[in-house]
Amino acid sequence: MPFTLGFPELATKYKVHGSEFGLVSEAEYFALADAFMGGPKGSPTMERTRADGALVRYNEATEEFGILSGGYIRTYFKPDPAEHSFVNNRAYFLWVAGGVGRGGRG
């Protein structure tokens, strides 16, 4: 039984990010996203609720990152500092979660 209400952009996000999680099917990618975003927060997962009510999670050990809004998964991936331009993924998480300004960029 899923923890969340679903993943509206599942097919699109799977095409873009599925390979970041190894050889997983679309259903397995959803199960990983659902457990990460809706299940109990494991250690060392960081979690913040933004002003807009969205829940943002990031796990420093596995590099998983996701956003849950209105009970739906909005995104789930492993961020890459080469793509987001922050000094590391923790700084990226803090910025997306609304905790710090853009000063975390390298």
Image: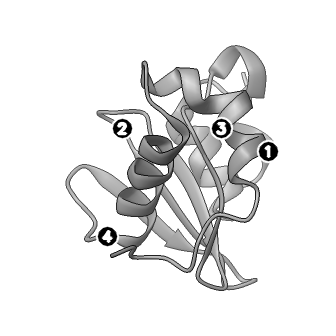
Q: Earlier in the sequence, mark 1 or mark 3?
A: 3
Residue that numbered label 4 is attached to: 39
Residue tagged by mark 1? 102
User: Whole-Å distance between the Cαs marked 3 and 4?
Assistant: 20 Å
Q: Residue at x 54, y 32 (%)?
A: 78
Say what amino acid the circle numbered 3 marks: Tyr
Q: Residues within 10 Å of mark 3 (few under 14, many from 20)?
A: many
The amino acid pointed to by label 2 is: Glu
Mark 2 or mark 1, earlier in chain = 2
Residue drawn at (58%, 40%) of the image:
91
Of circles 1 and 3, the one toward us is 3
Which mark sits nearer the N-terminus, 2 or 4? Answer: 4
Q: Which residue is mark 3?
A: 14
Separation of marks 1 and 3 at Cα, in angstroms:
28 Å
**Picture layout, residue 14 above or below residue 106:** below
* Mark 2 lies on residue: 60
Mark found first going from the N terminus, 2 or 3: 3
Q: Nearer the viewer, mark 2 or mark 4?
A: 4
x and y percent of residue 96 in the render? 70, 55
**Amino acid type at image mark 4:** Gly
Q: Secondary structure at mark 2?
A: loop
Q: Residues within 10 Å of mark 1 (few under 14, many from 20)?
A: some
